[in-house]
Amino acid sequence: MADDAWIGEAAPYLAPREAGQSDAWTDEAARRGRRGGQRLLHAGEVEAPEAVRAALGLSVGERAVVRRRLILLDDRPVELADSYYPLSVASGTSLAEPRKVPGGAVTLLEELGYVGAEVVEDVSAGLAAGEEREHLGLAEGSAVLRLLRLTRTADGTPMEAALMVMPDGRHLTYRLGRRDA
């Protein structure tokens, strides 16, 4: 594994943040002596891609709210992250507005009564598409990892489908259960 390889965990990104606490990415980067950040590229209603529509159980033509962010590490782009929410969850909330969500999306969702109880992630690899190459600063023919994360409530209601695109070389680590167990 290269010295600059990044191994991350999903669990901190699914937990609500305490008042005044920075976002999970900023915390993770800081623990490694780095600077994490993000730039909101778009927020609003869109027609979701087919994989997201299927994950959220949306009909063809049914719209969703998306928050598209460019994830930065030391001011360099490292991930393109699109979080999609059914209109029944996010319409009329700050998730649909092009501004920072105080406390982050997971915290707002909890306040709205949506708590993630089940997460299913699907990881695939492929070549970066034009917009992905542009945002991530990749050359034509560059490989990327794509992670589709579906979060459901305890009753099985899909509340978020996040589609993340990362340059090759990214490592994903999954921890199940408690650390002290």
Image (cartoon, rainbow, N blue to C red):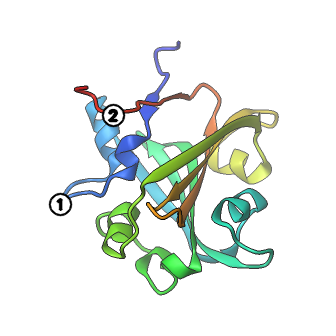
Camera-nearest residue between 62 and 76: 62
Q: How many numbered callouts?
A: 2
Camera-nearest residue between 77 and 172: 172
Q: Which quadrant holds the C terminus? A: top left
Rendered residue at 63%/35% (across/down) = 167
Q: Is residue 101 at least partly visible in the picture?
A: no
Rendered residue at 48%/64% (across/down) = 155
Q: Is residue 82 above or below residue 110?
A: above
Mark 2 neighbour class, 10 Å CA radius: few under 14, some 14 to 19, many 20 or more: few
Q: Dividing the picture into quarters, in which one does residue 87 lie?
A: bottom right
Query: Which label was assigned to residue 34?
Result: 2
Mark 1 neighbour class, 10 Å CA radius: few under 14, some 14 to 19, many 20 or more: few
Q: CA distance from mark 2 to mark 1?
A: 20 Å
Camera-nearest residue between 110 and 26: 110
On the rendered structure, is 116 left or right of 180? right
Q: Is residue 56 at least partly visible in the picture?
A: yes
Q: Is residue 162 above or below residue 146?
A: below
Picture coordinates of residue 116, whole percent (x, y): 42, 58
Picture coordinates of residue 41, whole percent (x, y): 56, 64
Tag 2: residue type?
A: Arg
The mark closer to the camera, 2 or 1, is 1
Picture coordinates of residue 97, whole percent (x, y): 48, 79
Q: Which residue is mark 1?
A: 20
In the current view of this chain or complex, which residue is farthest to the front? 155
Picture coordinates of residue 157, whole percent (x, y): 53, 67
Q: Is residue 2 above or below residue 42?
A: above
Camera-nearest residue between 102 and 115: 115
Tag 1: residue type?
A: Gly
Rendered residue at 34%/37% (across/down) = 29
